[in-house]
């Protein structure tokens, strides 16, 4: 399963690990993805979302209804 946030679209970034001797090797910076279940009152059901921690804080601020509207506006099915 991809490490991708359904709300913000955060994906892994790539860079280099630099050792003490300054040798560079590839590495990957993954977003902190969590699976979270929210009650969606307008539909009378729970929705399970794969979100970054930053997106969970955003939902706390704007509400689940607005967040689901943003996700659906991007064309993602919930």
Image (tube, helix red, strand yellow):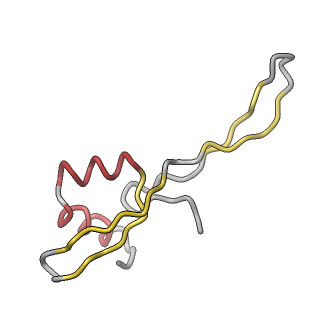
**Could you tell me residue 61's position as x and y percent?**
18, 48
Q: Is residue 25 above or below residue 59?
A: above
Residue 39: image quadrant is bottom left
Q: Is residue 24 left or right of residue 15?
A: right
Query: Residue 31: percent from the left, percent from the top?
Result: 52, 48
Q: Locate residue 47, reporting x and y percent.
A: 30, 75
Q: Residue at x 67, y 43 (%)?
A: 14
The N terminus appears in which quarter of the rendering? Answer: bottom right
In front: 16, or 40? Answer: 40
Where does residue 65 sit, x and y in percent of width and height? Answer: 18, 67
Where does the C terminus fall, quadrant-wise?
Answer: bottom left
Q: Nearer the viewer, residue 64 or 46?
A: 46
Q: Is residue 75 left or right of residue 46?
A: right
Q: Residue at x 25, y 62 (%)?
A: 67
Total numbered circles: 0
Tell me: residue 69, above or below residue 55.
below
Q: Residue at x 42, y 52 (%)?
A: 52
């Amino acid at each position: 399963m991809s490490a991708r946030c359904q709300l913000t679209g955060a994906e892994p970034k790539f860079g280099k690990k630099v050792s003490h001797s300054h040798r560079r090797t590839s590495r990957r910076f993954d977003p902190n993805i969590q699976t979270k279940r929210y009650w969606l009152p307008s539909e009378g059901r729970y929705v399970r979302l794969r979100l970054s921690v930053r997106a969970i804080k955003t939902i706390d601020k704007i509400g689940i209804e607005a967040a689901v509207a943003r996700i659906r506006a991007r064309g993602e099915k919930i």
